[in-house]
Image (tube, rainbow, N blue to C red):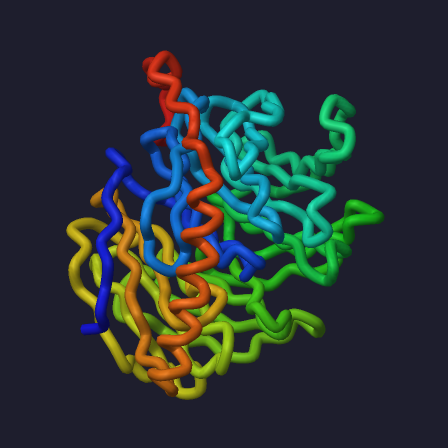
Amino acid sequence: MEKKKVCHGHSRPVVDLFYSPITPDGFFLISASKDSHPMLRNGETGDWIGTFEGHKGAVWSSCLDNNALRAASASADFSAKLWDALTGDVLHSFEHKHIVRACAFSEDTKSLLTGGFEKILRVFDLNRLDSPPTEVDKSPGSIRTLTYLHSDQTILSSCTDIGGVRLWDVRSGNIVQTLETKSPVTSSEVSQDGRYIITADGSTVKFWDANHFGLVKSFDMPCNIESASLEPKSGEKFVAGGEDMWVRVFDFYTGEEIGCNKGHHGPVHCVRFSPTGESYASGSEDGTIRIWQTNPANPEENESSSRRVKHNVDEVSKKIEGFHINKEAKTAEKPSDP
């Protein structure tokens, strides 16, 4: 078992995790939970920084922009929110007509993408918050996951109720390719180097060529897997988590299981590697986040890097006066477990 840190704070299941890229102030981890309160943490240590207060329903997805200065969240309260990641203030609330299941910032940080039960992809212009979004309403099912690729030229989406991953051309609004899967895709990720699309569907983890869209590898897992993530530096291993409550590590080339981390007390809903590749996080039905340390190839180099990142993150943490904790926002939420 690899060294881990248990991060408490959420009172209901953790359903989504997102790491920021490495910024001048270190890197950060944001978590989405059915308790309606996304949380921001030091990405390396897992230490709590702040809680975003304002949603009145389960939060299904959360993310940070490339500078980790703004956050976004998608909720069962029929809204997506844009937040100041330094103060915790709501910058804008984008109202929808049904549950919002997914959100993603564009690489250039100028747009926010949302999707959910309305089966509509919406692109909001973050430079004109009050302007109506660009809408694409051809999704064949309720939207489960969303991400940008190809320098914001392509949108990748999966559905809650049907298999496959669809690739949309941003300019035309049309589906240009479908990556076929037998089961609905519960997790999709674009590798840090842009080479692969990683998907989890049923008991299978697949790796697709992100440029030509061919299937590169497909591995059968020991149980139904809800999420998978590729190590970003060497790309030699990936992690996966699902219904058996364990976080497993696999060899990318052979699919052989090379590690198994136990500790969660409920199904694992999300796993993500940190941008350094030195750790990965898992979120579970048990309401906890666990950060697992990988074994660095060069311990001295890792220690130096860790000290540098920790110093930078500590510095930015000192600048944060504290997030607004609005107790009145904790009202009864709408039904949020479809």
The image shows residue 73, relative to residue 236, as above or below, that is above
Which residue is found at the position 43% from the left and 30% from the top? 323
On the rendered structure, is 332 left or right of 176? left
Q: In this view of the protein, which residue sits in the foreground, 105 or 51?
A: 51
| Quarter of the image where the N terminus is located | bottom left
The image shows residue 97, relative to residue 49, as above or below, that is above
On the rendered structure, is 11 left or right of 66? left
Asked if residue 16 shows in the view, the reply is yes
Residue 227: x and y in percent read 39, 58
| Quarter of the image where the C terminus is located | top left
Which residue is found at the position 83% from the left and 48% from the top? 171
Which residue is found at the position 25% from the left and 55% from the top? 243
Residue 21: x and y in percent read 55, 59
Residue 229: x and y in percent read 44, 66
| Label tally | 0
Which residue is found at the position 31% from the left and 80% from the top? 295
Q: In this view of the protein, which residue sits in the foreground, 320 or 112?
A: 320
Q: In this view of the protein, which residue sits in the foreground, 311 or 190?
A: 311
Asked if residue 186 shows in the view, the reply is no
Q: In which quadrant of the rendered view does residue 44 lie? A: bottom left
On the rendered structure, is 268 left or right of 192? left
